[in-house]
Amino acid sequence: MTDVPGVLVGHTTVDDGADLHTGVTAIVPEQLGPGRWTLPAAVYAGNGHGKLVGSTQVDELGVLESPVVLTATLSVFRAADALLGHLMERRPDGLSFNPLVGETNDGHLSDIRRRPITEAHVLAAVAGATGGLPAEGCVGAGAGTTALGYKAGIGTSSRTVRTAGRTHTVGALVQSNFGGVLTALGVPLPVDELVPAADRTEPPGNSCMIVVATDVPLDARQLRRLARRAVFAMARVGASFSNTSGDYAIAFTTSDQPPIPDAAIDPVFAAVLDAVEEALLNSLFTAVTTTGVGGRTSHAVPHRAAVERLAAAGRLTARPYA
């Protein structure tokens, strides 16, 4: 995600080692500031069983006017209020603001009803956002999430794309918390075959938040097309798109140039699919086994067993555990 120039990521993790495994993740475009208070943006709900605060205005006006904040379901409104305060401080003459805050439900591992996220947690994630490689796995808004039967979390990735005569970057960040059967490089890695039954507690399939950032010049209509492809990418890793899974994508561009023609957009679509797929896999393969509220344990993907399966399927050129 941070390979896109000017896009920063920050995390605040709230983890007491027992019943709380939650947090905040903030995506902060540096281009959003004095002289330019909006960026072209779009949202897409693959399945709208969730709470993406601020999404209807983004959908209507086609602009982003705040950092994007991700957190836990029952903390989303406190996070939105905290982000609103941040926006009001930055623009003391403003009379209307649209904080954009998404969520997934981490209640399988975290005591979500305690609503532990505070204004300070949100402001720390925003203020602490930096460039460079963001932390992944059990950090920030991914501290307590699970996906595809395993412990999951935050994942990020990017692709370089050449289109309309220029080179650009497409970045993705995900908060993974959805159901299905993990699939990597086309190879199924089902939890019921890789983790002993006695060690498993089956989490529900709850949701996925995807944020796509790019410096490709695009308008809101084109960004909505990118957001749709971002949700499509979930199928590559085995998502089931269940009834209770709120699967959302937010896409924005930092560019202030005229949009590229639609005839030049296919390489950008391909980059989105690849970046989101890799971000989803990173969110799982960087996570660690976590025991949370009620003594429930969510196991990380067993790397050795996964590599052996991928190698047996001819999907690896090297075997790191050989």
Image (cartoon, helix red, strand yellow):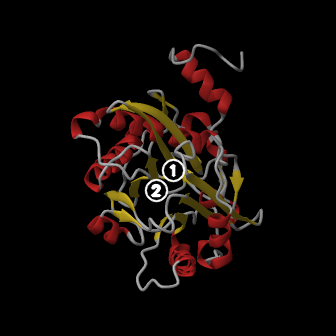
**With respect to residue 25, does 190 lie above or below?**
above
The reply, left or right, for residue 81 in relation to residue 96 is right
Callout 1: helix, strand or loop?
strand
Q: In this view, does 198 lie to the left or right of 87?
A: right
In primary-sequence order, the first of circles 2 and 1 is: 1
For residue 174, which numbered disc appears in the image? 1
Question: Looking at the picture, how far across and down is residue 246, in whole percent?
Answer: 40, 60
C-beta proximity under 8 Å, tags 2 and 1: yes
Q: Residue at x 55, y 16 (%)?
A: 312
Q: Which residue is labeled 2 in the image?
A: 209
Tell me residue 119's x, y (percent): 63, 78
Front one among 15 and 238:
15
Q: Can residue 234 be seen in this view?
A: yes
- Residue at (63% x, 61% y) in the render: 109
Quadrant placement of the C terminus:
top right
Give, as a three-letter code, the residue at label 2: Met
Left or right of residue 160, residue 85 in this image: right
